[in-house]
Amino acid sequence: MFRLFRKIREEILIGKKTRRYLGYAIGELILVVLGILIALQINNWNEERIEQRQIADYAHALIKDLERDLAMAAVIQAEVGVLIDKIDALAAYIKDKPIEEVRNIDLYYLMRAPFYRPYSWNRTALEQIKSSGALRQMKNQVLAEKIAAYEAFTNHLDGDFDFDRSVGARSVALAGKVVDMNYPNVHEIFRAEAITYAFSFPESEFHSAYKDTNLSLLTDDMEDVKVAVNSYLVLGGYYGIRPRAKIEMPRLATSATELIALLEEEYPE
């Protein structure tokens, strides 16, 4: 009988130990899991901190690129403005003028090179932001959307440039049928004039340099002249370059300036 009670007692003690050990094991498991979770959280926090530091570096580089874009765009806007002035002067020059009063030197000066320089966007930082996925990781998604919108607008301006270039090339081809362009060393004259004058008509360095060079028009039909001039008017119209100077370039400047301010606020040095 005593042996039976002793056996029962031993089994109870063994059961208590088992439960105790099981409790210890569960507790240790919980501690291990908590440790892993904390380590993962710390690792995620470190990775996010590194990512945000990298995004901040990209943002600072983007600010510099935007500032260079602004400087580049200001030069192009000035060039487009001069081109518009030339086309407006061309339209006024031939208005109600008989062919006998149209001078070759005047048409050459007004029709020469109806182009502006191509855009040279500074996209290094933007490409890094896109390729790294930083645009999606930005905490300020309004800022990210504005960056994407800015890129889309620059692509739109590139498309406008291609259109303007094609219209300008057609205009030059038509001008070549009515204007004798054989002025010697003309590029040197225009290079010197560009340093001191934006646009001056009818008084210009070009007119002074070639006042004794008597070249005649290639046509005696005013209709030929008007056909050529019409192509320039298309280029200088509201479906041509005029919106570049009056609407699009100011919009670009506003967008870039606003982006710079937002980037500086979001990612201060």
Image (cartoon, helix red, strand yellow):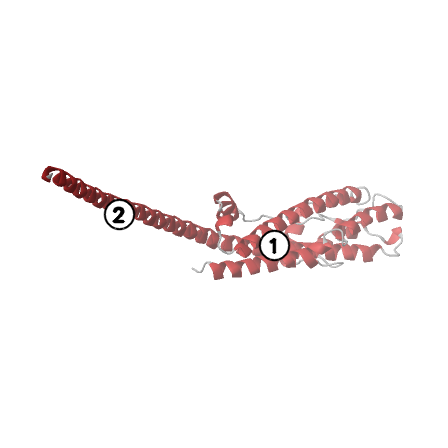
At label 1, counting other C-alpha atoms closer than 10 Å, the crowd grade (few under 14, some 14-19, many 20 or more) is many
**Label 2 SS:** helix
Task: Depth check: give the residue in front, 154 or 24.
Answer: 24
Of the residues shown, which amino acid type is indicated by label 2? Gly
The disc, 1 or 2, on the residue closer to the chain's N-terminal end is: 2
Task: Depth check: give the residue in front, 202 or 170.
Answer: 170
Residue 131 is situated, as x and y percent measured from the top left of the image, at 50, 43
Residue 97 is situated, as x and y percent measured from the top left of the image, at 88, 55
- Image height check: is 120 above or below 200? above
Which mark is in front, 1 or 2? 2
Residue 133 is situated, as x and y percent measured from the top left of the image, at 49, 45
- Image height check: is 208 above or below 8? below
Q: Which residue has dot 2 on it?
A: 27
Task: Depth check: give the residue in front, 4 or 94.
Answer: 4
Residue 109 visible in the shown view: yes
Label disc, if present, on residue 73 of the rendered structure? 1
Of the residues shown, which amino acid type is indicated by label 1? Ala
Residue 158 is situated, as x and y percent measured from the top left of the image, at 64, 46
Q: Quadrant of residue 195?
A: bottom right
